[in-house]
Amino acid sequence: MSAIRASESSLLASSQQEELEDLPKDYPLSTSEDEGDSDGERKHQKLLEAISSLDGKNRRKLAERSEASLKVSEFNVSSKGSGEKLVLSDLLEPVKTVSSLATVKKQLNRVKSKKTVELPLHREEIERIHRQVAFNKTSQVLSKWDPIVLKNRQAEQLVFPLNKQQSAFAPIEHVLSGWKARTPLEQEIFNLLHKNRQPVTDPLLTPVEKASLKAMSLEEAKMRRAELQRARALQSYYEARARREKKIKSKKYHKVLKKGKAKQALKDFEKLRKVNPAAALEELEKLEKARMMERMSLKHQNSGKWAKSKAIMAKYDLEARQAMQEQLARNKELTQKIQLASESEEEEGGTEEDCDPLVSDVVNEVQVKANRPNPWMFRNHSSDTKEAETQEDPEELAGSMAHEASESEEEEGPVAEEEILLKEFEERRSLRQKSGLNQIAEPVGRPETKDSSSQAILSELRVLSQKLKKENRQSRKQEVSSVKTVLAVQREKPAQEEEEPLLLQRLERAQTLDKLEELSKEGCFQNKELPRAAAEGQCLERNPDNHLGAPKEKKKKEQMIDLQNLLNTKSPSVKSLAVPTTIEELEDEEERAQRQMIKEAFAGDDVIRDFLKEKREAVEASKPKDVDLTLPGWGEWGGVGLKPSAKKRRRFLIKAPEGPPRKDKNLPNVIINEKRNIHAAAHQVQALPYPFTHHQQFERTIQTPIGSTWNTQRAFQKLTTPKIVTKPGHIIKPIKAEDVGYRASSRSDLSVVQRNPKRLSIRHKKQLKKNSID
Amino acid sequence: MKVKMLSRNPDNYVRETKLDLQRVPRNYDPTLHPFEVPREYVRALNATKLERVFAKPFLASLDGHRDGVNCLAKHPKSLATVLSGACDGEVRIWNLTKRKCIRTIQAHEGFVRGICTRFCGTSFFTVGDDKTVKQWKMDGPGYGEEDEPLHTILGKTVYTGIDHHWKEPVFATCGQQVDIWDEQRTNPICSMTWGFDSISSVKFNPIETFLLGSCASDRNIVLYDMRQATPLKKVILDMRTNTICWNPMEAFIFTAANEDYNLYTFDMRALDTPVMVHMDHVSAVLDVDYSPTGKEFVSASFDKSIRIFPVDKSRSREVYHTKRMQHVICVKWTSDSKYIMCGSDEMNIRLWKANASEKLGVLTSREKAATDYNQKLKEKFQHHPHIKRISRHRHLPKSIYSQIQEQRIMKEARRRKELNRIKHSKPGSVQIVSEKKKHIVAVVK
């Protein structure tokens, strides 16, 4: 279509041109007619001018009247129209009246509608636009590598060469050809096989099949596999759904389902009756038969073995009769109860929610107990209600209430009711699945208070929990998006300008163990040389486990100071007689109130005593411990409750030497931690290394051993997998699109497109702009 | 009387065949194996020390050239074959396993400016100062035959570099412009220019094979698209870039070896900021080549050393030098990612191990497990001061060492000056330019 249109338009254009060319020949315009005359006029005017210039004075030129104009005054002819452009419409106006000039009119109209051709852009600009377009295109092409690059960068292990040789499956005949039956058993089996003409050596694959196998490319195979996978997933989904539905124990659900089905069947039947009465009759018969079968197979209450025997005995035995009656009653009761329960469930649920949704399970249970004497029924019921409550997520409560309302409204329409019930079931199930996720939020949302104001609180909490959930969802989304932007972020990661050099370049060689030892010692000295204050500061920061007491101590100190201040404020204020007593009293009262408040606030904690206790503990802990080497039961009687004798204990107890005196011995309100070991510090990491964000993270990595002494073989292998594995003697080729599952570009790079870039116009520019905006 | 005896099921301790491993019962109770961290620390320390003790990277020196080695090329199909071109126009083909020259060709008059192999490995191309591009067969001539090139293309101007397409019979040369040639034709199928300056090297992208990168002496790096026959973008740096190398595993990443002692790794989609600035050399970087795993690259420098950089680190992890090695002009990482070759001014090609302390040859599984474990230990304790110090220690010749010191002082002075300037000027008026942005002059679209 478009081609035809294009050709049409081109034809039109050409014809127009021809017409335009023809135009002056066929219809010579009036202007060109008197060319000769105008020439003469011009000459005449020149002559006049020459004459006027002769006398030297600059005379005022009088405009000549050459054409008819609008304003004609008696002195002068205004030349207003002369400066204006000739407009086509002006020319056309006189033509309008003449009918014979219709063709000219048409042509002129066409000319009017035609637009001028845009100027081609400057060459440099054209090139720049070309480059930009090409760059955008190329970056798009390259962006397909982003996920692969990211994956490879984050991979735990990369095995090179990347393109694994796909183990070519050898057809069985090839395998068999090299194998011979040796043992008698094998020979026997072979004979049997040959007797039955099993295909042993003849090719299992026909040439056609082989060809098809070869022809099927990787992509095709992949596509087919994907299709199959999809089909399988669908199937399994339907199976799972069927199983799930089958598993639902709720009788009500099944009842409703069955009812719905029956309704549907009835409808269908009605339709069928209208369309095809004979078939409908048959169907009816079938239905009748099914009903009868159902009736026959129905189990009656007294059909059991025990019931029958009792029935026989009932004539003579009062007890048996009584038992039977009891059983009957029980049976009736049970059946009734089930129905009742199923009905009352809804009602109760509804009423409870209406009156007070905050009533705890216990209260519910009590109510239920009052209603039901049967413990079994009760248990079922209560669990049901519990479930119902758990399902009534705070978020969903309003919705479910609305549902109930609608239910009560639509009680008249049975079909609608069933649908709603089914929906409700579905909802409940989904809720039950959700409840796992909501476990954290739920206890917040379900306080067990029964205050009058609790309703409001509860609603607030509901809103809160909803917000929480939303936030969760958002954060999850953000995570996903963040993964996407990792690459970009990596690109934008601020330069670590002052990165420490990886190598410590020196003039000495160190290739023997002794020298390496020296090296490490040097490191020690360097560490020692660190300014002490700085080092201490560092150790304070970096060995938090050694200084567990330190931050606490600080806090304690602050508290102490506060307390002292408070004590100071407590000291009796100096009363001067000059000051009016009433005000003072007021102030005093205020102070007292404040003091009282503080007292109340810090009623529980005696900070000073706590600190003393802590210090005592610290001192105890830092004392060197005695070593007890007594072995119970060695050289004595052993057994439960026996202790080694005092003599033995004395003998095997190694007393620890008295340590040096503590530095904080004479400082009553300071604990100085003396655990820091300078020798160990030389081996300790001073600052938190780069990828770690918290010291605990780093410590954890250090504390998990990776050796085979502490790990099983499998774990050891897993822990020590190298990041990059290369095969010796194998050439590693650059990564290919086919290796990672992309389509290799079908277009050859050779097809260099030589274009003429001169015909690029503003249209292209616009396109480029659009591209760049995108 | 019944006698109770200890009895064990022989299945638990008797091997089925002689070839089975003896079952060694192990108790992994952590209380039986105390001091995990200190023990592992000591192991790590020992492993680090041994690594340094066994760090002997230099393998061989291939001598035979009679002038400085100007270019190197790998054989695409054979690991043992290496080609080298010298400044006197001689091309030699080497066998690395025998460490011998197997063929010598007097290819050009004047320098052999560039050499590259065809993707199939049957022939190779050289360009020289005599304005010719020559194609040679990889195998030597038969008995009595003359050693002549398959094709010779005589150009109008000097070609300074050549690279072959990775899949198709197309190659690119550079000189005054980037020419793309069909092997069968004597005229370029396409010439691409952007400005007028001599282009020193051109490289095909190994993954997206229609992309090319080139660097010219007017300090810029230009990217081209062969399919659309147009340059794409140009980035102008502070100083001249000598050569670039594309990452063979990441299509959009390339590294440029610059005269200002640094290497710049770029993402070609965002040329205004390099992904990483690699600095450690103390003189112009002349050549760079990626490891085929794409995780590291090696750079050759005018300061008579080669350095190995991890792609994501700005500092080198290894420096190689010998007393006799002069300015290193070209460097290549072999395609099994185990060795490094460098050709230098003093006519030798040297072969190095990529991992200085790696044991060569076939490893038994126990050896392999032990090296893996040691590697992981070193990694785990790499931040501990002793281990860090030992593993970082390198010996350097005095010239490089003193240059490093000098440059450190210079850098510190510059930094101090900048800080002072910031301190004494109106807040916000002096912008701190990051190291990455500092060296980029402009990006031209």
Image (cartoon, coloured by chain):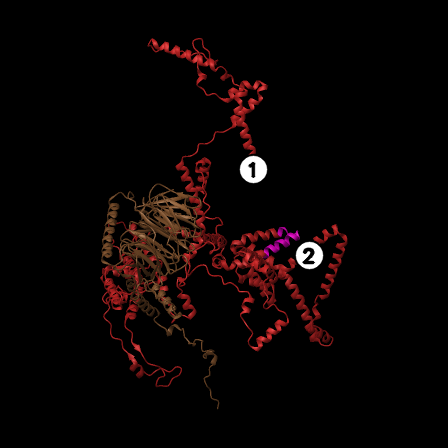
Q: Which chain shows up in brown?
A: B
Q: Relative to residue B117, is residue A327 depicted above or below? A: below
Q: What element carries label 2?
A: helix
Q: Is residue A512 left or right of residue A384?
A: left
Callout in the foreground (1, 2): 1
Instruction: State the residue position of label 2.
Output: A262
From the top left corner, tell me how far across and down residue A332 is, in percent.
67, 66
Q: For the point 55% across and 69% down, which residue is it?
A: A177
Instruction: State the residue position of label 1.
Output: A3
Q: What amino acid does circle 1 point to?
A: Ala
Q: Relative to residue B226, is residue A250 depicted above or below? A: below
Most distant residue in the bottom direction: B1
Q: Between residue B384 and residue A563, name the one nearer to us.
A: B384
Q: What amino acid does circle 2 point to?
A: Ala
- Give the distance between the C-alpha atoms of the residues marked 1 and 2, in whole angstroms: 61 Å
Q: In this view, does A660 lie to the left or right of A341?
A: left
Instruction: Determine if the magenta segment contains residue A146.
Output: no
